[in-house]
Image (spheres, rainbow, N blue to C red):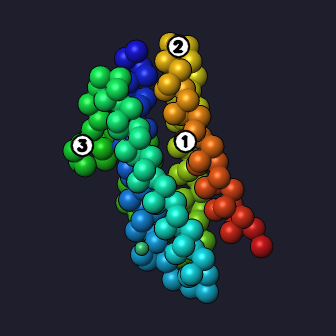
Amino acid sequence: MEILLKLLSDAQSSLFVLFHKTWAYHWNIVGSDFTQLHQLFGEQYNTMFEEIDRISEHMRYLNIKPLSSLSRMLEVTKIQGSPSSTGATEMLQELLSNNIKFIELMQEISEESEEQKQYATTNLAQDLMESHGKFVWKLRSHLQY
Ligand SMILES: [Fe+2]
């Protein structure tokens, strides 16, 4: 169970960082695709807002405390913190690789929770895998022209 709790904690922090980065890019995007990307990033950060709540409340259900300190989250996140990209292509590439990383974290949780027969956790991880898989599809599609 220890490993699973650590994986969930890492995933919660990573999702918080990815949420914040996507939100910041929603504000700061410029260029000819402004409207489309502003909306796309808006859709994704809103979805992640709900997902952070779901994963954190799931941790309470497993009787563990989700991290609530931002500085601690920045220490444990598996996705790099600062939103430093400035161009549209750079933002898309960064969010694409960050979402792929998040899916990998969900795959680890899915495997570990299944082994421990924590199927509600497996279900959560698989839902988030699909959701971020759709993010990846949309981000990648913007990069292919
Ligand atoms: Fe907005």
Vertical comparison of 123 with 115: above or below: below
Q: Please name the amino acid that badge 3 sits on.
A: Ser
Please identify, in this view, whether the residue under mark 3 or under mark 2 is nearer the observer.
2
Q: Position of residue 61 (x, y in %)?
A: 34, 26
**Image point 42% across, 50% down: which residue?**
50
Q: Earlier in the sequence, mark 1 or mark 2?
A: 2
In the picture, which quadrant includes the C terminus?
A: bottom right
Q: Which residue is located at x 57 percent, y 68 percent?
A: 40
Q: Which residue is mark 3?
A: 68
Left or right of 82? Residue 135 is: right
The x and y percentages for residue 18 are 44, 54
Please state the quadrant of the image where ligand 1 appears.
Answer: bottom left
Which picture quadrant has residue 122?
top right
Q: Can you tell which quarter of the image residue 54 is in?
A: top left
Can you name the residue that lies furthest to the right here? 145
- Residue identifier under label 1: 128
| Pointer 3 local density, CA inside 10 Å: few below 14, some 14–19, many at least 20 | few
Q: Secondary structure at mark 3?
A: loop
**Residue that mark 2 sits on:** 117
Q: Does residue 70 show up?
A: yes
Give the residue drawn at x 72%, y 64%: 141
Secondary structure type for disc 2: loop
